[in-house]
Image (spheres, helix red, strand yellow):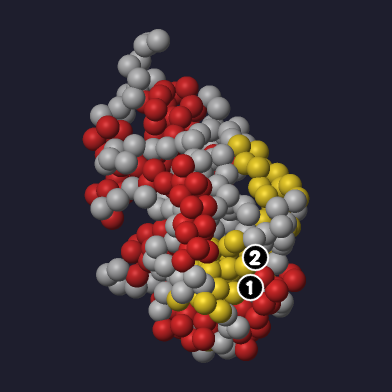
Amino acid sequence: MADRFLPRDRFPALVEALRDAGYRCLGPRVREGAIVMEEVERAADLCFGLRDRQAPGSYRLEEGTGRHFAWANGPTALKPLTFVPRETLWRARREGGGLRFEAPEPEVGPLAVIGARACDLAGLALQDRHFLEGEPDPFYKARRERLFLVAVNCTHPADTCFCASTGDGPRAEHSFDLVLSELDEGFLVAAGGPAGADILAALPTEEAGEERNRRADAEIEAAAQAQKRSLPSRNLRDFLFGRQEHPRWEEVAERCLSCGNCTNVCPTCFCHSQETVPDLEGEVSDQVRQWDSCFTSGHSYIHGIVVRATTANRYRQWLTHKLGGWHDQFGRSGCVGCGRCITWCPTGIDLTEEVAALGEEPGGA
């Protein structure tokens, strides 16, 4: 229960407080017809009054809500802010007849993100486990430690959302510094830690009251109930591994373009490749890491052989790893129910439908 309330006409104070504390701010803005996280200098820069309409292979925005956050999500989660799409890991330079090796420092500075959703936070928590447990990835670690996250509880899920079934939303439960619940007249605000408490103390809030909390809770519960898609909540490892030869893999391969859009927009996918990029003079060579996808032929290339040569093999790899193999690695599924892979698939492939179809007997009615 939040005990502080920020009236709508005082909402600009949030961005001002973050900037006064030294944070560069990112928030939802519209670019090329979609809501994306971009830099904002004032609250007026944030998109307002929009609602997203999402369906398999379809995304569009509509006006007329009177709120800042009456939408579910856009194509980008938090992933590009910590695990960037392409970066140099180390550099070799000819010098004095030998080689000198350099480790570029990632460009970091305090960064506040306004509008993270519960599914985004769940995706970030999984990325944290992959990149920070054991030997931490220094690039990810540096970017992760600079983040200040302002979460917003989701009250307007898209038709492609199913976070309620994965247990990851629509209420933000962890990994935030501040969490907002938007009502027509303003925002309930709560802190998730000391950094958030400092910002909250700087805001011109007032007592929240039980009635506002009841309305906010009712909207979040309604958002959960409104979700029509779902995944089975159980561990699907044995279910999927036992269907390696199911004909559905070939059927979905007839629609799948192997474009990798699903893995790019997925907040948890972490596969990457590395390549050596020399300059034209041959004096400097960069070792570059970039996002990769299990839908490319290069992802399964081993010494002259592409292990997963067909689209059916690649889709099977993606789904069985995401929903099955992740249980062995991380103790849970790799899907947080954001639905981005459904919306941004050019042919509208829906993984919830694919899982259901794999449960049917081949040749059944």
Reading the image, the residue beneath label 1 is 7
Position of residue 268 measured from the top left corner of the image (x, y, whole percent):
43, 55
In the visual, does 296 lie left or right of 192? right
User: Front-most of 160 and 300?
Assistant: 160
Compared to 219, does 98 lie above or below? below
Compared to 51, does 182 lie above or below? below
Reading the image, the residue beneath label 2 is 185
Quarter in which the N terminus is drawn: bottom left
Position of residue 41 measured from the top left corner of the image (x, y, whole percent):
71, 78
In the visual, does 277 lie left or right of 337? right
Q: Amino acid at mark 1?
A: Pro
Dot 2 lies on which element?
A: loop
In the visual, does 232 lie left or right of 337? left
Residue at screen point 34% across, 37% down: 232
Q: How many marks?
A: 2
Position of residue 313 measured from the top left corner of the image (x, y, whole percent):
41, 33
